[in-house]
Amino acid sequence: MTRQRAQIFQVIMESPRHMTADEIFETARVQMPGLARATVYRNLGLMVRDGQVRRVRIAGEPDRFDRVVEAHEHIHCPRCGSLEDLRVPWIRERLENELGLKVVSMSLNVEALCSRCAREVSPSICREREASGLPEDQTSNMN
Ligand SMILES: [Zn+2]
Ligand SMILES: [Zn+2]
């Protein structure tokens, strides 16, 4: 493994979040000022190919990279864009046991409000927010 690849891999391993390639680039660049964006993209592709990290695709958004490579699904919040792990092994078991499917791989993104957004959109809290003049915060976790 090249030093650059090791550094990029470490950024992913140390982040509790599912980062985009650009977020990984911005973080890795702090340690390696000469790092090129294309190098990050190329190495991410190699790591996905080698099963070191997992690529999570979300329609209309940049791919995220996941340090957890074991089978699991995701909950995507359409309001703030956050991505959380979802463990529902029984879905696969039921597909296999009840429908007789031989599942090769499964990729499920559930669109659901995260707990923070669910609180914020609840009607009573919404009115308080508007009254207090707090700005709408749609992109806070994009960077
Ligand atoms: Zn949210
Ligand atoms: Zn995940």
Image: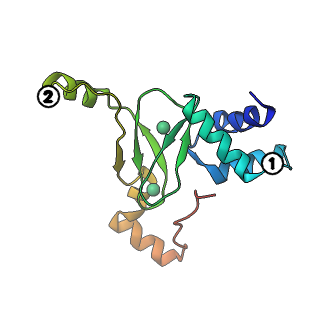
Q: Quickly name the residue at label 1.
A: 35
Side of 49 where 115 appears, left or right: left
User: Which color scheme does this rendered protein use?
Assistant: rainbow
Secondary-structure class at tag 2: loop
Task: Please name the amino acid that badge 1 sits on.
Answer: Leu
* Residue 26 position (above or below residue 70): below
Residue, disc 2: 99
Direction top: furthest residue: 97
Residue 67: tell me if it is visible.
Answer: no
Which of the two discs, 1 and 2, labels the residue nearer the N terminus? 1
- Real-space Cα separation, disc 1 to disc 2, in angstroms: 49 Å
Q: Horizontal placement of 115 versus 62: left or right?
A: left
Q: Is residue 103 visible?
A: yes
Q: Nearer the viewer, residue 7 or 75?
A: 7
Across and down, in percent, residue 113 comes to 38, 55
Residue 108 at x, y percent in the picture: 34, 42
Do tag 1 and tag 2 residues touch (Cβ < 8 Å)?
A: no
User: What amino acid type is highlighted by mark number 2?
Assistant: Leu
Q: Which mark is on residue 5?
A: none
At x 52% / y 75%, what residue is drawn? 132
